[in-house]
Image (spheres, rainbow, N blue to C red):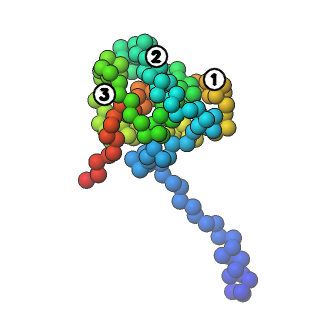
Amino acid sequence: MSLFGSIKNKVLTPIRIKKRVFDPEKMSIEDISLPASMDKIEDDKIRDMVKDEVATFKALDYINKPLEYLKAKEYHSYQIGILLKYLKGDNVFAITKIDTVLPTFVLGTTKRQLHIKVFDVVYRYDIGVDKDASLEELKKEVKWTPLDAAYLLYYLSLSERTLPKKR
């Protein structure tokens, strides 16, 4: 084989790129990526906005709704973004009488399962929400469920979020 034939074969050989596998257990709050418009919301206002989201969740009586109802898309990217922004700040939001707000099956989720569910939402938000979207556009984008919000609210209420090491 000639020198050029050898080079040609090496240049034209496709390079295999490994797909990165999504692993929510390895994700943390540093992986939360929000639209620029969300980042502009002042941090001191976010707590009150989360308080309003908890009040809305309770007022809509999601605790007594069947699971299938909680899977309907009712939340917009702005609302979920508010919860993610609060989480990104590594803040804790204690929910008074949480058992009267969130469904029992959400409260019964193990810390590992909860972490996986929350960072699945983070991942879907990252790939599914335009980072250049305005607040108005985010408010029109209804693609999240009350179940997504419930897991985020529960996660926000935990003061200890680190996962135990796998055995």
Give the residue at the far right of this rendering. 4
Helix or strand or loop: what does disc 3 sit on? helix
What residue is shown at x 66% (from left), y 33% (from top)?
133
- In the rendered image, which residue does mark 1 sit on? 140
State which tag comes first along the sequence, 3 or 1.
Answer: 3
The amino acid type found where label 1 is placed reads Lys
Helix or strand or loop: what does disc 1 sit on? helix
Q: CA distance from mark 3 to mark 1?
A: 30 Å
State which tag comes first along the sequence, 2 or 1.
Answer: 2
- Name the mark nearer the viewer: 2 or 1: 2
Instruction: State yes or no: discs 3 and 1 in contact (Cβ < 8 Å).
Output: no
Give left or right: position of 164 versus 68: left
30 vs 1: above or below: above
- Observer-nearest residue: 134 or 65? 134
- Observer-nearest residue: 132 or 147? 132
- In the rendered image, which residue does mark 3 sit on? 107
32 vs 155: above or below: below
State which tag comes first along the sequence, 3 or 2.
Answer: 2
Query: What crowding class fits label 2: few (fewer than 14 Cα within 10 Å), some (14-19), or many (20 or more)?
Result: few
What residue is shown at x 47% (from left), y 34% (from top)?
86
Residue 70: x and y, percent? 43, 21
The amino acid type found where label 3 is placed reads Leu
Marking on residue 48: none
Q: CA distance from mark 3 to mark 2?
A: 18 Å
Give the residue at the far left of this rendering. 167
